Image (cartoon, rainbow, N blue to C red):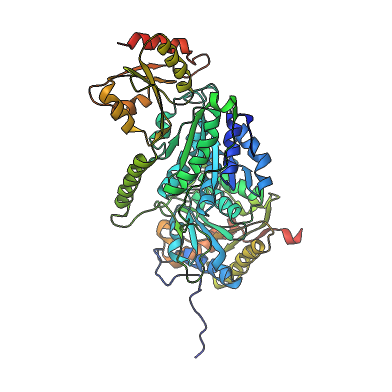
Amino acid sequence: MNQVFARSPSLKDVQTHFCPGCHHGSVHRLVAEALDEFAIRERTIGCASVGCSVFLYGYFNIDVVESPHGRAPAVATGVKRARPDSIVFTYQGDGDLAAIGTSEIIHAANRGEAITVIFVNNTTYGMTGGQMAPTTMPGQKTSTSPYGRDIKNDGAPFKMAELLSNLDGVAFSARVAVNSPKNVLSAKKLIKTAFRYQVEGRGFSFIEALAACPTNWGMQPLAANERLADEMIPYFPLGVYKNSANL
Amino acid sequence: MSGKLFVKGNEAVAMAAIEAGVRCYFGYPITPQSDIPEYLARELPRTGGTFIQAESEIGAINMVLGASAAGVRAMTSSSGPGISLKQEGISYMAGSELPGVIVDIMRQGPGLGGIDASQADYWQATRGGGHGGYRIIVLAPGSVQEMYDLTMLAFDLSDSYRIPAMVLADSVLGQMKESITPNPRPFCELPQKNWAVRGWKDGMSQNVVKSLKLGDGEMEKFHWEMHARYGLLAEKESRWEEFRTNDASLIVTAFGSTARISRTAVEMAREAGLKVGLLRPITLFPFPKKVYQDLSKRCKLFLDIELSTGQMIDDVRLSVQRDTDVAFYGRPPGAGSLPTPEEIFEQIRKVYK
């Protein structure tokens, strides 16, 4: 019998705490596959953030540093500068990276820190129960935008992959999604590219992964997947926004 | 380096950090400590170390957190407003049992305050400063030589006890030039940093540096463990200096630059025939409680002098025998508020019995 699918060796054989239909598990898997692919698991250090992604150490077979809310790019800077031979990545949600941590992400990117940032955008604060995030879409109802996000009051959602692509220090910036097999395959390729750029010493690489949060969106997993395709992707277009290899 | 050097207190801190083997410095400009990042920006890269001028004080302390988690000696420095911003990171470091050195060259506050000398951040430094209930090691130099020596000690104590360590000085000590002997780093047996993140290789165990403690009873256990460690620290690492306390019927107590001015005042008192001594705590946390307990068995009158309306006096009162009187003379920080020796001598006369 041919084995066609197996757990990634970079992942632990455990059940996650993620809700049904949550995309964190898929993104974890793709990151783990990239570590497997380049055989870098043993020299990889993960920087966990605050939010649903805080339990990184419970799911990956790697050493992990926990960071204060939003500070993972600064923590990763410290780790990478102290151990330049290691592969360092942060894994952050939208509240963490695009609200409380804007200063840290922009400056780490601008310095061209040789790290990889995995940014999971699900348009809400998952861990705290579905409040408005910096990426919450116009009109989207959350527990702190009960009448829908009002751009006049709250500003427009951040488009981080585009924003960071304007900085000279960024070697690679792309937005992916994991809502369909096609998008997963494309996401896998781009996440691998992001890590490859770090392995090759090209500088800062950034992946924004659009993700569903069915629990806080108040949707069934399949409906959440549809919302991602119908509403999020048109607003947050997928693709590569910066690729230093093309410059 | 050898022989004598004539340097600023801030430069002595930076030189000592290099001698202590600091590999990473992360900081942000703020008066009156900017000589420290300026010196290290120039000298640290020459030793193969990393200097980054961070985007913020918050960025800087979190870079220290990361570098320290990766097992190297890391430090930052700042002053009041910047130290306030760093408290988040210091709390996380304390919760993650991470070493690291933070230098605080105190200026006036609250708020933007001013750049003259102050001791009004004593509470912030010795009570932990951030959320959650923790302490950090606090060393208070009284000379440029001690700025050098105690910076090296801060690294060793921090690594030994896995508690962040602060060098707490003020703008007088930071900006003052004195001759020092740049001693080589003293030998200190240090534990292996086998907890540091370094890449989880097969056959090793996973290292996770974190402050999140959700397990049943896990957080309570952590707090009692730290409580015991603070006790050990007090027992083994308390440091102080005594000057003519043997026969004193009044003991002046002060730390840092105020202790220097007080010493001159004590000398004046002795010349006037008054039996006065000086007790200068060098470790503010752990506070050298025992020496206060012991001296107050005999001497029932203390005079606490501070550049504030009174903060260290809390620790002095908690430490002396219950029948001891603790008088206070303070000059809240600000331009022109540094007391003269004559002024302190006058206070000595006033309370001396």
Residue for point 48% across, 61% down? A212
- Point out residue A42 in the picture as x, y percentages from the top left corner: 54, 67
Task: Give coordinates of residue A20: x percent, y percent.
Answer: 40, 66
Against A38, residue B242 (above or below) is above
Give the tally of numbered discs: 0
Q: Residue furthest right?
A: A247
Q: Nearer the viewer, residue B247 or B255?
A: B247
Residue at the spot x=48%, y=21% of the render?
B260
Q: Which quarter of the rendering shows the N terminus of chain B?
A: top right
Q: Nearer the viewer, residue B74 or A142?
A: B74
The extreme left residue here reads B323
Tell me the residue at 45%/70% (across/down).
A12
Which residue: 63% across, 62% down? A194
Q: Quadrant of residue A115?
A: bottom right
Q: Is residue B134 visible?
A: no
Query: Taking the image as drawn, is residue A154 in sight?
Result: yes
Q: Is residue A136 above or below residue A9?
A: above
Q: Nearer the viewer, residue B107 or B147?
A: B147
Residue A83: x %, y % from top left? 59, 56
Residue B92, percent across and down? 44, 46
Does B350 sit left or right of B108 as displayed? left
